[in-house]
Amino acid sequence: MIWTKSGIFVGRNYVINMQQTTFRIDKMDCPCEENLIRMKLAEITTIEKLEFNLSGRTLDVWHTGEVEPISAELDSLNLGSHLVVSVEEKGEVIAEDDSRQRKVLWIVLAINFGFFLIEMTTGLISRSMGLVADSLDMLADTLVYGMSLMVVGAAIAKKKRVALWSGILQIILALLGLSEVIRRFVGLEVIPEFQAMIGISLLALAANSVCLWLLQRTQSKDAHMKASIIFSANDVIINIGVIVAGLLVWWFGSNLPDLIIGIIIFLIVIRGAVRILKLSR
């Protein structure tokens, strides 16, 4: 038995006096937002444990200090966070399995990076801006998962530098993509291959579903594993959007559906990049 500043170690678990604070986070609808929040709160040493509910869009924080610093960090992400309840808690807190979480993050990182390469290559060959844009969304996820792997044991300055360059890279790529979309809007009529759009997006949809399932399994409550994939992931909605755009390209014989979905996804990538840049401050 080992005494700590907040209580007693019991193996890998804690028995401590602390606060359990619940936050509602309206815009937390996929694991990327979860990882951004984990990174943002990693600097607060009074936090003992985080527990996410993506389907319910809530975050439970067990901590030993004041709640105001935690609220301030969450507010800075502009995810629509607000405090629901904060109560005193005494009991056993099961420590998170960092090794298991690292393993899952490496798996989803590899899947996302692999599909970034597949979608980018296929998008360029098939002339689909929707697939190119979706590949950048996959790259954005890869960067977020990569930064999440750096949180444990990484120097804060190093983490912020990686966040800065990751955000800048995403914005540059997204702006280049938007410029190509505009160029095609104003005069270059390029009809993408709808078969590639639909086929690759179906594979990406399956890959994102696997990633979400793996991430949700790392949560401590079974309810989190049952969260709706479509409800909890913008990535899944994006994949469906590209599939629908591919069908509309085939139906109308026009590149407009592909360009429209491309614009939407590029803007989503830029929004995510801005959030990552906030972590570099």
Image (cartoon, rainbow, N blue to C red):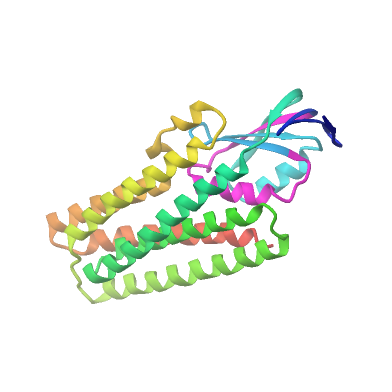
Q: Is residue 139 left or right of residue 250?
A: right
**Residue drawn at (69%, 62%), measured in percent from left and top?**
281
Counting labels gives 0
The location of residue 118, given as percent across then percent down, is 32, 63
In the rendered image, the vertical position of residue 144 relative to residue 166, given as above or below = above
The answer to if 32 sits in the magenta stretch is yes
Residue sitting nearer the eye, 262 or 168: 168
The location of residue 59, given as percent across then percent down, is 61, 35
Query: Can see residue 239?
Result: yes
Q: Could you say which quadrant of the image residue 92 lies in?
A: top right
In the rendered image, the vertical position of residue 70 relative to residue 153, given as above or below = above
Residue sitting nearer the eye, 154 or 157: 154
Position of the N terminus by quadrant: top right
Q: Could you say which quadrant of the image residue 173 lies in?
A: bottom left
The location of residue 123, given as percent across then percent down, is 28, 66
Q: Could you say which quadrant of the image residue 195 lies in?
A: bottom left
**Residue drawn at (75%, 47%), measured in percent from left and top?**
44
Q: Range of the magenta residues? A: 18-47
Q: Is residue 28 left or right of residue 45?
A: left
